[in-house]
Image: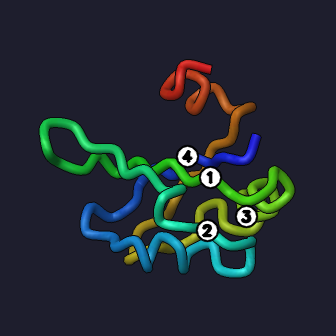
Amino acid sequence: DRALMMRGTPFRATMDELIGFFDGHGTIKEENITIEEMNGRRTGSVLVIFETSDHAQAAKDAKQKGDLGGRYIDLFDENDSMMQRVCRL
């Protein structure tokens, strides 16, 4: 309940850019960010774990379809079928 899955992230997004995307929604540490790769290449999906479920939900509400590196970002939480399927919840 403290995690969000990001879809559509730029392949070259840095950790600082990913953390900055959620500025104002609690402290996010690099070790709480997992960038998905397949065959050594980024897929555009990132899992971010927040300090609290309240921070995660506030971030989802505020940043859904937000811009990161010229791309809009889709955010999914544990209640979304996309995240349930990908994370096998």
Q: Earlier along the polypeptide chain: callout 3 or callout 2?
A: 2
- Residue 5, labelled with which disc? 4
Q: Residue 59 carries which label?
A: 3
Q: Which mark is residue 28?
A: 2
Whichever of labels 3 and 1 marks the residue nearer the N terminus, that label is 1
Residue 60, image quadrant? bottom right
Mark 1 vs 2: CB contact within 8 A: yes
Q: Which of marks 2 and 4 is in front?
A: 2
> Is label 3 in contact with label 1 (beta carbons under 8 Å)?
no
Callout 2: helix, strand or loop? loop
Task: Give left or right: position of 17 versus 48.
Answer: left
Say what secondary structure mark 4 lies in. Answer: strand
Q: Which of marks 2 and 4 is nearer the N terminus?
A: 4
Q: Find the distance from the CA under tag 3 to the CA under tag 1.
A: 11 Å
Identified by mark 1, the residue type is: Ile
- Real-space Cα distance between discs 1 and 2? 7 Å
Q: What residue type is labelled 4?
A: Met
Rendered image: mark on residue 49:
1
Label 3 – label 2 distance at C-alpha: 12 Å
**Which quarter of the image is occupied by the C terminus?**
top right
**Which kind of residue does numbered mark 3 sit on?**
Ala
Name the front one of labels 3 and 2: 2
